[in-house]
Image: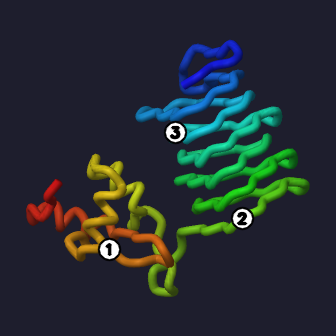
Amino acid sequence: MRNKKKTEIAPQSDNKMMDVSASMKGTLRFDDPVNLRINGEFEGTLDTKGTLVVGNKANIKANITGEIISVAGTVDGDIRAFSSLTLDATARLTGDVETPKLSIAEGAVLNGRVQMKGGDASNGSFAEGDWMTSYELAKYLEVDERKINEWAEGAMLPGVRDGNNWIFERSKVDQWIAEGKVKA
C-alpha cells in the first residue's frame, strides 16, 4: 500500500470513525468491525466489516465489500453491502450493486445493475438470513471463495444457482458440515 498524504486515524470505539485522508493503492481489509471514513483517493480492493463511509471528496476505484456502506463521493467499482447501501445526493457510482437494502437520495447517480436479495423463498426470492452468497459462505467456513464455487460446480456442496451466482441455504450447509463432507 502506498500513501501520498498523511493518514489521519481517530481512536476506535463504537461511535468513533477512523478517518483516512490519503491517496492509497492496494488491498484494505478489516477482519473485525471498524467504522471507517475515506476522504481521499483509493484504488484497489476494500473489504470491510462495520460501517464504511465514502466521503463527498473521496474518489474510489475499487470493488467494495462491507456490511453498512454509505457513499457521498465517487466510486468506480462494484459494491456488495451485506446490510445496507446508502447513496447520498452527491454520490456518483459506476458499478454493480448487491445489497438487501438500498437508499438513493435525489441527485445521486448510479450507473450499473442492482441486485437486492431478501423476501420469501416461495415466490422465487430468498429469505434474508437463511441464505448465504459464495462470499458469505467462504467467510463462514474460513476458506477461499473460489473453493466454495469449485465445490458447488462439482456438486460437492449443496447450493442453488441465482442467476450467475451460487447461493447456499444455511441449514443444508450446516448439515453438510455435520456429515463430515467438508474437504479443504
Q: Nearer the viewer, mark 1 or mark 2?
A: 2
Residue found at x 32% / y 74%: 159
Distance CA(mark 1)–CA(mark 3): 25 Å
119 in relation to 37, above or below: below
Q: Could you say which disc has been placed on residue 129 in the image?
A: none
Residue 169 at x, y percent in the picture: 33, 70
Q: Is residue 62 left or right of residue 132?
A: right
User: Which residue carries the number 3 mark?
Assistant: 48
Residue ID for mark 1: 159
Mark 1 or 3, nearer chain start: 3
Location of residue 81 in the rendering, given as x and y in whole percent from the top left corner: 57, 52
Q: Earlier in the sequence, mark 2 or mark 3?
A: 3
Helix or strand or loop: what does disc 2 sit on?
loop
The residue beneath circle 2 is 112
The kind of residue on which mark 2 rests is Gly
Q: Residue at x 64, y 37 (%)?
A: 43
Of residues 14 and 31, the one drawn nearer to the viewer in this rendering: 31
Judge left or right: residue 117 versus residue 101.
left
Q: Position of residue 180 (x, y in %)?
A: 9, 61
Q: Type of residue at label 3?
A: Thr
Q: Which residue is found at the position 68% from the left and 68% from the top?
A: 113
Mark 1 lies on a secondary structure that is loop
Q: Quadrant of residue 15?
A: top right
- Does residue 67 sit above or below 11 in this rendering? below
